[in-house]
Image: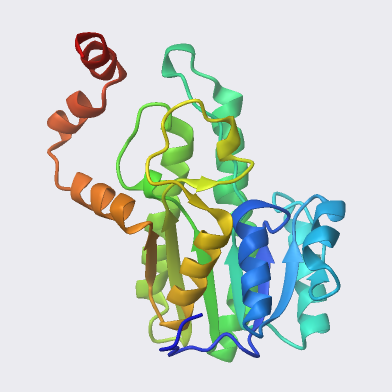
Amino acid sequence: MSTDARWPLAGQRVWVVGASSGIGAALATELAARGAQVAISARRADRLADVARGRMTAVPLDATDDRAVATAAQAVREVLGGLDTVVWSAGHWQRSDPRTWDGPAFAEHVRVNLLGLNNVLSAVLPAMVRRRSGHVVAIASVAGYRGLPGAEAYGSTKAAQIALLESLRASLRHDGVRVTTVAPGFVRTEMTAVNTFPMPFIVEADQAARAIADGLERGRVEIVFPWRMALVMKAARLVPVRAWAALVSPRRRREAARGA
């Protein structure tokens, strides 16, 4: 646990959306262990109950349903006696192949990763601004830093999330509302279990949860981990556009593998 907490989590009223598995479930467990009052939401009510284990309030919802999100937000406020922090951890990932462009698959990424987040912000942000107090935390991805082959849909929505959060941080800095961007590298979850490609520097979900909780307690506005992946992807921003396309081209990697 962090020993230099600037913003202690103990006593905080936190709502984690997308907490039935993976990073969201692990983070909810970590937050509760640090003394936060936690409510969790996702579509799978049975999985939520497994995560809650009587220590958290479970409020099932479909984040893509704006009315369901608004109703759930009100229920969370009533149960917790208010809401200090909302954590967006829901997400959709499917590898893209632009040679056979799948429009519905792209739309599903937008529907979950962007419009779902929009629904949550709509349900909590106005009240935070009126109260001049609150904290918005959203889990994006280092995949949003540069365009990657196979991540045309996922990476686009993660880049949009990063830009959205950065804009919110600037707009709300004098309104008492804090905004934190979380950009993990590869984390071992149900989502990444389907991947057949190398996942360098992969970490376990509980490690990710500790890194996020430590960052929140230290007042970080951006939490990126593991540090080696953070270093690689931050440096990638400096590579010229034409050079980047050549560098990450799948054909280039295949040719390199054949020549090895």
Which x, y percent locates residue 98? Answer: 43, 19
Residue located at (58% from left, 74% from top): 125
Q: Is residue 192 above or below residue 139?
A: above
Q: Is residue 187 above or below residue 155?
A: below
Numbered marks: total: 0
Residue toward you, 33 or 251: 33
Residue toward you, 84 or 51: 51
Residue located at (59% from left, 28% from top): 105
Q: Is residue 251 above or below residue 191?
A: above
Would you identify the image quadrant in which residue 194 lies?
A: top right
Residue toward you, 167 or 42: 42
Which x, y percent locates residue 248? Answer: 26, 28
**Viewed as shown, does residue 53 lie left or right of 172?**
right
Would you identify the image quadrant in which residue 247 lies?
A: top left
**Viewed as shown, does residue 81 lie left or right of 174?**
right
**Viewed as shown, does residue 124 lie left or right of 154?**
right
Residue located at (79% from left, 56% from top): 61
* Residue at far front of view: 260
**Viewed as shown, does residue 14 lie left or right of 94?**
right
Which quarter of the rendering shows the C terminus?
Answer: top left
Which x, y percent locates residue 254? Answer: 29, 14
Which x, y percent locates residue 48? Answer: 80, 59
Q: How is the image coloured?
A: rainbow
Q: Is residue 7 above or below residue 58?
A: below
Residue located at (68% from left, 77% from top): 32
Q: Can residue 258 be spotted in the picture?
A: yes
Q: Can residue 123 be spotted in the picture?
A: no
